Image: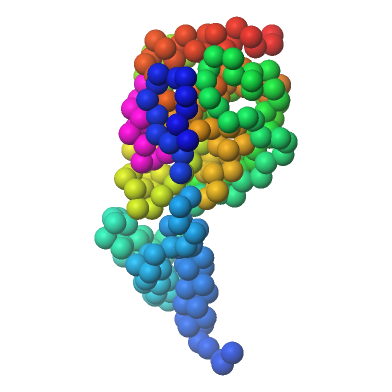
């Protein structure tokens, strides 16, 4: 999956009557197992591990017990939680952030990226990709917008993505990103057994401040834009046509030059 022709470093893309409390416990258990199959799978694994399912079953019991617990003086029921998911522990919260999908693609996918030189995707209408952020809010990329958009596809475990994020944040902080350029992140290639999982926490820890779409387990979003490595960057005009693509991390000066060249072709 590595790009050819670009010097930038990158990573390749991979029935009886029950009490109310018992009913609550059963409902929570069913929901928890569903979350386990969604959040713990990756592009290489179609099902979750037994340890992940066991952790979610324990979470279901905690949720059911919390709902049955008496309220304290503030009117809130007491719930216990631990933070580290790597120790098979989860927070007993009403709703968990999703780490993948769903994704809907409208339009033909772009050709797989090979090089910035003579990229055949330049000037082609991008597909419209509709997805969700980690909290379930809808995000659309590829549709007409008020401003040009830079889409940055990132994998939480990719060392080059971890180097790319602070460069982009530094350009934003210094005011060197082009004025009127929108930025959208796409978390892709999510894998529960790789570093920095879950990505919903990773982007917070990295200080990423832009809207972020959660790609699905089949990598439908990055495939729609022809991504062949990570990080992968696409610049779109306000009408949704492709202005530029690149694969791999880059220095601040190279990023500015890349954006200036791309936006020089943008419509007024």
The quadrant in which residue 235 appears is top right
Q: Give x and y (percent) for residue 17.
A: 56, 91
Residue at 67%, 41% in the rendered image: 105
Residue at 41%, 49% in the rendered image: 191
* Image: 144 above or below 102: above
Q: Give x and y (percent) for residue 194.
A: 34, 48
- Residue 25 showing in the rendered view: yes
Which residue sits furthest left? 87
Left or right of 110, for residue 23: left
Any magenta on residue 104?
no
Residue at 57%, 12% in the rendered image: 262
Task: State the extent of the magenta-drawn residues as a range.
Answer: 153-167
Q: Nearer the viewer, residue 263 or 117?
A: 117
Q: Nearer the viewer, residue 158 or 61?
A: 158
* Image: 201 above or below 122: below
* Image: 250 above or below 31: above
Q: Give x and y (percent) for residue 149.
A: 59, 23
Left or right of 207, for residue 119: right
- Residue 142 showing in the rendered view: no
Residue at 46%, 39% in the rendered image: 13
Q: Nearer the viewer, residue 209 or 75?
A: 209
* Image: 33 above or below 148: below
Q: Nearer the viewer, residue 34 or 82?
A: 34
The quadrant in which residue 253 appears is top left
> What is the chief secondary structure element of the magenta stretch?
helix
Any magenta on residue 155?
yes
The quadrant in which residue 126 appears is top right
Q: How is the image coloured?
A: rainbow
Q: Give x and y (percent) for residue 201.
A: 38, 44
The quarter of the rendered structure image containing the C terminus is: top right
Which residue sits furthest bottom? 16
């Amino acid at each position: 999956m590595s790009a050819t022709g670009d010097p930038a470093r990158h990573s390749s893309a991979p029935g009886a009557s029950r009490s109310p409390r018992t009913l609550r416990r059963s409902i929570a258990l069913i929901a928890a197992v569903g979350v386990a199959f969604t959040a713990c799978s990756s592009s290489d694994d179609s099902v979750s591990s037994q340890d992940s399912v066991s952790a979610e079953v324990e979470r279901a019991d905690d949720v059911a017990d919390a709902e049955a617990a008496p309220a304290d003086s503030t009117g809130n029921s007491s719930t216990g939680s631990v933070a580290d998911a790597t120790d098979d522990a989860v927070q007993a919260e009403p709703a968990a952030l999703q780490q993948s999908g769903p994704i809907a693609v409208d339009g033909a996918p772009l050709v797989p990226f090979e090089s910035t030189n003579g990229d055949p995707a330049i000037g082609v209408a991008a597909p419209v990709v509709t997805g969700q952020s980690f909290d379930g809010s809808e995000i659309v990329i590829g549709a007409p917008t008020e401003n040009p958009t830079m889409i940055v596809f990132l994998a939480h475990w990719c060392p080059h993505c971890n180097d790319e994020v602070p460069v982009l944040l530094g350009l934003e902080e210094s005011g060197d990103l082009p004025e009127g350029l929108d930025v959208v992140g796409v978390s892709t290639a999510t894998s529960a057994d790789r570093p920095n999982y879950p990505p919903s926490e990773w982007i917070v820890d990295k200080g990423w401040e832009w809207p972020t779409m959660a790609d699905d387990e089949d990598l439908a979003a990055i495939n729609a834009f022809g991504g062949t490595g990570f990080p992968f960057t696409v610049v779109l005009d306000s009408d949704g046509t492709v202005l530029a693509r690149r694969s791999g991390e880059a220095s601040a000066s190279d990023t500015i030059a890349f954006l200036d060249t791309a936006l020089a072709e943008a419509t007024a």
